Amino acid sequence: MTGNTTDTSMMARMKELEAENSRLKKMYAEERPKTRTSGWKPIQPGKPQQNADVERFNRTVRYEWLSQCLWSDLEEVRLFATRWIHDYNHFRPNMALGGITPKQRLAMAA
């Protein structure tokens, strides 16, 4: 009998939480500006220009090391990728950052 009472009280609490969540969503929708146009939108297929930063990074990875080597297994690729990303962020100057590394840029921002 105790288990059934617990299940019933849990279900009642879940319904209360769902009602509260619904109320908060409605309140948020009413309060935010109606002219807001920015926000998260998925990238359209075949439109890499909508995600230029990631596409540029992918191109760098592909041309600098991925297509330059023959890999024996996936673990070898993962190990090389880990090392390469560390070097990319700590030692490789980035022209978009004025010739400094991402690590230096992060230190300047802190």
Image: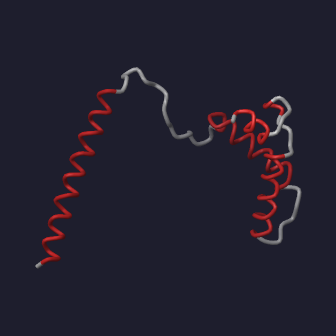
| Residue nearest the observer in this picture, 93 or 67 | 93
Q: Is residue 3 above or below residue 93?
A: below
Residue in the picture at 79% in, 31% down: 96
Question: As drawn, which residue projects farthest toward the front?
Answer: 110
Q: Nearest the camera: 62 or 32?
A: 32
Residue 93 placement (x, y as % from top left):
86, 38
Left or right, 44 with reference to 80: left
Q: Quadrant of the N terminus?
A: bottom left
Image: 19 above or below 26: below
Q: Residue at x 77, y 40 (%)?
A: 102
Task: Pick whichever, 103 or 29, lies toward us.
Answer: 103
Residue 81: x and y in percent read 78, 58
- For the point 52% across and 40% down, which residue is it? 42
How many numbered marks, from 0 up?
A: 0
Extreme-bottom residue of the structure:
1
Residue at position x 82%, y 36% in the image: 94
Image height of 88 relative to 107, above or below? below
State the image quarter where residue 103 is shown.
top right
**Please, which residue is most extreme toward the top here?**
35
> Horizontal and vertical percent for residue 71?
83, 67
Give the image's coloring scheme: secondary structure
The picture places residue 52, in percent across and down from the top left corner, at 68, 36
Quadrant in which residue 76 is drawn: bottom right
Classify the position of the C terminus by image quarter.
Answer: top right
Left or right of residue 77, residue 109 in this image: left
**Side of 49 where 72 appears, left or right:** right
